[in-house]
Amino acid sequence: MKRLNTVRIKDVTMPDFSITADGQGLTQGLIMCYLKCRREFMLRLNEWGKESKKITFANGSITHDSLDMIYTHYKSTGKPPSLLSIKAFINGYDTANPSWLGAGHKEEIPKIKAVAYVVVTEYMRYYRKDFETMEIIGAENVFDVIWKGYRLRGKKDLRFRIAGKKWLIETKTMARIDESEIEDKISFDFQSQFYTHAEEVEYKETVCGVIYNVVRNPGHKVGKDETLKAFTGRLRKAVRKDPAHFFKRWSIPYTDADKKEFKKELLYKLDEIKMLLQGKIHVYRNEKNCVTRFQCSFLRACASGKLVGYTKTNKLFCELEPVCLDDKIKTLKHPVKITWKTDNPLFKLTGGKHGKSCEIKYRIAGRKPKEKS
C-alpha cells in the first residue's frame, strides 16, 4: 500500500537558494510564481508539485513540443520534417516523457496524440510561409545570462530575422482565446519582454519584438459510436475550414522606452526576491490568487495544511539542462524506440556522464542508438 505523504506546509522552510551570478538563478516562470504567491514560490523552490498532471497541460505540452521539434528540424536541415517523422515523434512522446500525464488519464493518450497530430500538421499547412520567408537563427535555444549581478535563465522557442531585423516567437497553447484581452496584455507581457531582454544581453544586438503565436486546443469530443479515425477526420475538416479560429498571431514591437521601463521594474522584482531568500521579508500566501481563471495547484495543500497528494520530485530547471541518453533510457519502464539518423536529426541530447552529443529520431526500432562524438 502506498504511504501517504503527511508533511505539513508550516514545516516547509526556504531552501538554500541564490539568484545571484554564482547561484541557481531564476527563470521567468519562477519570477511570475513569486509575484503570484510567495508560499507557492517557496514550495516550488523545494521541488514540491502535484502527483498527477491535468489533461489541459498534457494537450498543450505535446503540441508545443511538437512545434518546437518542427522548427528545430528546419533549422538543422533546411526543410520541415516529413509527416511520418511528426507522427513518429508524437507516437513516442509518452515513452520519452514518463511524467507527461498522470496514471489516471492513460486512456486519454490515443485521443490526445491524434488531436496533436491534426493540429500540428494543419499548423504547418497554414504557416507554410514560415519556411520560406523566415531566416531562422535559433530554435529551442537555452540561455543563461548575468545581468546586474543576477543569473537569468530560460529557453526561447524561436529566433529569426525578417528583412535583416531580429525577432523572437513565443508559442502558447490555449483552450480559450479572448482576443481583446490578449491584445491588451501582450503589450507588456512579462515572458516576452524577459526573453527579449535576455537576447539583447547575450548577443548585444537589438531585438525588434516578439511574435505571440497562439494555438487553440480544440474542444472537440469523440462521439459515442465514433472511431478515432473518424474523429480525427472530422477534426481536420473543422480546422481546415476555419484555420484562423485555431491559429492566431500578434506582433509586439518594443520601443526603447518599453525596454527601459521593463528593466527598471525587473530589477525591483529581483531585488525583492533576493530579500525574501535572505529572510529579510516574510513568506505568506496570497489568497487573491488561489482561484482565478486557473486554480492554484497548491489550493488543496493550503486548505488542509498538509502536502497529501504532492511529491517532492518536481526538479527545477530540468527543461534547461542537457540530458544523458543512457540515463534517460534507464529511467523508462519501456525503453524508447529510436533509431540513429545523423542526416535528419530531431533532437540533440547532450551531456551526462559521457559528455558527448547524440542526435536521435523517433522511429520504430528495437535497439539503442550509438553515440556520436
Image (cartoon, helix red, strand yellow):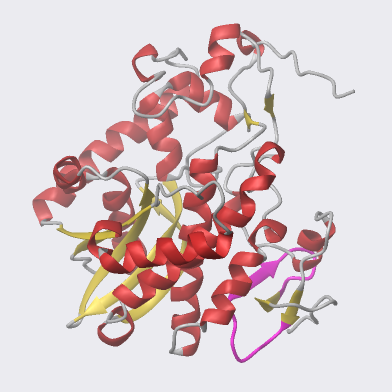
Which stretch did the figure color magenta?
340-356
Spot occupied by residue 360 in the image (x, y as percentages of width and height): 67, 77
Spot occupied by residue 156 in the image (x, y as percentages of width and height): 41, 61
Q: Residue furthest front?
A: 225
Residue 184, above or below 166: above
Taking the spot 28% from the left edge, 44% from the top edge, the residue there is 190
Q: Evaluate whether residue 204 shows in this view.
A: no
Q: Nearer the viewer, residue 145 or 8?
A: 8
**Image quadrant in which you'd find residue 130:** bottom left
- Name the side, left or right, on which 86 lies relative to 337: left
Spot occupied by residue 239 in the image (x, y as percentages of width and height): 34, 63
**Does residue 345 show up magenta in the picture?**
yes
Q: Residue furthest right?
A: 1
Q: Nearer the viewer, residue 85 or 11?
A: 85
Taking the spot 11% from the left edge, 56% from the top edge, the residue there is 256
Q: Quadrant of the N terminus?
A: top right
